Image (cartoon, rainbow, N blue to C red):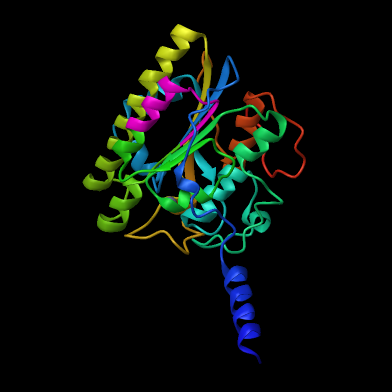
Amino acid sequence: MTKSLFFSLLTSFVIFSCDRFDADKEICTTCKPGSEPVRKVLFVGWDGVRSDALKNASTPNLDSLILSGIVSYNCDRGEFTVSVPGWSTILHGVWPNKHNLSENSFRKNKYEDYPDLISLAKQFKPNLSATVLTNWDDFLRITSNEDYSQRYDNDEQVTDAAVQLLDECTPDIMILHLDYPDYIGHRLGFSSSGMEYRGAIEVSDFYLGRVMEKIYAREMNYNEEWMVVVTTDHGGEGTGHGGQDNLEQTRKVWSVIRTPGATNHELTQMNSVDLLPTMLKWLGITGITNLDGVSLN
Ligand SMILES: [Zn+2]
């Protein structure tokens, strides 16, 4: 084998084994003004929040959303109880047998066949503005085609940026990912009543309140109508959550879907894949045939 052939084979192996994502993705920071005058979507993901722990926590801001919307504490997030498959299921609207991710790796993704919320929405409405903010690098790889996607050092910075962007460009789709509950769960335990874990959930609710304060003001002053979806990607047991497909406290999660003026309605069962068609329908987008869920609105 010649040296150049060896190196070209080596290069092709390296390319083949790399994830198909732009390394510079996190510095995409165009604050493009939203184009939808009324209906917009805020999606907030709280990583690793058990349903029973959520019920035990004091979450006044989430409670306000539940009062005007759908809530379920029995939402099947599917198998492979780690974050990448979980967020992929939620934000691509299909189960792992389609998006093909079963661990915290993107290598085998079929995202091209099953695009994410932002990519799907922009197929129908190319002028939409979309923002994703997180403090977990890999979360940025769940979606694509954002106008603004940025990674921060902590949930407080994510919240600060969200509030600022809502003023500066008011995207049509804003996705926030808060990681603190999962971080505490891994360090000190996921449980129904652990004080530290409960505290992390309450901190997340505080940040939700800061963002909602801005959303409520915009609804009042600019006649915007925001669907606000809050959910989680998995629960947990002990200090972990991987390989717990059959544990209710890990697999059966909660979801909240708030729309202005709606009345409270609890669903005894739903699936995480239902969230994407619900958000798309709010934006006037229906008729995508290869999704696994149904709109709940
Ligand atoms: Zn997670």
Q: Quadrant of the N terminus?
A: bottom right
Q: Quadrant of residue 12?
A: bottom right
> How far across and how far down the image is residue 117, in percent?
61, 38
Nearer to me, 265 or 223: 223
The residue positioned 54% from the left and 53% from the top of the image is 22
Residue 73 higher or lower than 2, as above or below: above
What's the magenta region? 160-175
Q: Is residue 83 left or right of residue 12?
A: left
Given residues 133 and 74, the one toward you in this image is 133
Residue extending furthest bottom?
A: 1
Identify the residue at horizontal 36%, vertical 29% (top origin).
208
| Above or below, comparing residue 207 to residue 26 in the picture | above
Residue 164 highlighted magenta (yes or no): yes
Q: Quadrant of the C terminus?
A: top right
Taking the image as shown, residue 204 lies to the left or right of residue 100, namely: left
Count of numbered tags: 0
Magenta segment includes 229: no
Query: Does residue 204 appear in the picture of this structure?
Result: yes
Asked if one can make out residue 233 in the rendered structure from this viewpoint, the answer is no
Spot occupied by residue 32 in the image (x, y as percentages of width and height):
52, 27
Query: Residue at horizontal 77%, vertical 40%?
Result: 289
Residue 290 position in % (x across, y down): 75, 45
Residue extending farthest left: 195
171 in relation to 198, above or below: above
